[in-house]
Image: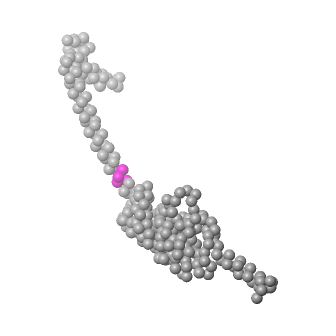
């Protein structure tokens, strides 16, 4: 056959074009690629590397052997991990409905491919592990702890625990958070609120009783200190002490402004009125 034959020439050009098209593949910034040769992993292109210098990437056009090598794309971005609501029994025997979410990334595409094959299967495995860890860890807490700011520490503990298992699938859990933690509607919710209200009222009574006790102690100490100061002051001038006590007695007696007192002129009570001050 001669290449001058138009049909042969077109056939050759078609084969060359097919080889060129099947030999080149494109990798974006958000992808990492596994190249398999006859079904066995051969190399990784644009793999995730947290220590890589900024701007250095494997993205772009790459070559492969046509018909012998295949390209498997793996997402390089952080992905959401879908989780269903979980019902957890807290330590104070309350059924709590927990709505949590997580995010993960594939950090070792080869490990992921060899262990589960696809990102979807990796996400399924991570979801099952995370669900189990959530139920175990949250079941060790009371309901109040699930609503407190300290639950962030609990989420970090769960994240570290899940990441140890996630390494088997070439994945890393980036974040775990509880969106909502509620009691089921109905009688359990009302009963829980009643118990919480009773507990807070008991705590309030305890605090008030402790405050009253401390107030009595402080008043007693203050009265004792005042008595000591009065005793020291009056001991320095007995005449002034007698005058001061008489003034207090007069104030108490004539406080309402309508009191009438019938006493003999030489009564000791009227001594200050008579000017018999020593």
Residue 32 located left or right of residue 20: left
Quadrant placement of the N terminus: bottom right
Q: Nearer the viewer, residue 172 or 102?
A: 172
User: Could you tell me residue 98's position as x and y percent?
Assistant: 47, 66
Q: Is residue 166 above or below residue 242?
A: below
Asked if one can make out residue 95 in the rendered structure from this viewpoint, the answer is no
* Boundaries of the magenta span: 201-205
Q: Quadrant of residue 157?
A: bottom left
- Residue occupying image coordinates x 59% and y 81%: 68
From this view, report whether residue 157 is shown above or below residue 239: below
| Image height of 234 relative to 143, above or below | above
Residue 165 pos. (x, y %): 42, 70
Residue 25 inside the magenta-drawn segment:
no
Residue 153 in the image: state x and y as whole percent.
41, 58
Which residue is at 30% across, 46% downward? 210
Q: Specify the quadrant of the image occupied by residue 137.
A: bottom left
């Amino acid at each position: 056959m001669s290449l001058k034959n138009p049909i042969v020439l077109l056939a050759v050009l078609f084969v060359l074009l097919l080889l060129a098209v099947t030999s080149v593949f494109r990798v974006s910034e958000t992808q990492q690629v596994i190249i398999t040769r006859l079904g066995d992993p051969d190399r990784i292109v644009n793999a995730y590397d947290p220590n890589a210098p900024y701007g250095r990437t494997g993205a772009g056009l790459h070559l492969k052997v046509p018909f012998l090598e295949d390209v498997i794309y793996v997402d390089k971005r952080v992905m959401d991990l879908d989780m269903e609501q979980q019902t957890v029994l807290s330590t104070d025997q309350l059924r709590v409905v927990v709505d949590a979410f997580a995010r993960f990334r594939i950090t070792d595409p080869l490990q992921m491919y060899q262990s589960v094959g696809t990102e979807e299967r990796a996400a399924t495995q991570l979801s099952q592990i995370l669900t189990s860890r959530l139920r175990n860890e949250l079941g060790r807490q009371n309901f109040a702890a699930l609503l407190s700011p300290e639950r962030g520490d609990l989420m970090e503990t769960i994240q570290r625990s899940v990441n140890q298992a996630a390494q088997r699938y070439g994945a890393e859990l980036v974040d775990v958070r509880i969106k909502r933690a509620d009691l089921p509607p109905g009688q359990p919710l009302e009963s829980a609120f009643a118990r919480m209200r009773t507990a807070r009222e008991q705590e309030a009574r305890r605090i008030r009783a402790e405050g009253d006790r401390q107030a009595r102690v402080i008043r007693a100490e203050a009265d004792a200190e005042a008595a000591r100061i009065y005793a020291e002051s009056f001991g320095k001038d007995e005449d002034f002490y007698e005058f001061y006590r008489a003034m207090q007695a007069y104030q108490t007696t004539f406080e309402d402004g309508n009191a009438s007192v019938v006493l003999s002129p030489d009564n000791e009570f009227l001594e200050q009125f008579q000017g018999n001050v020593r």
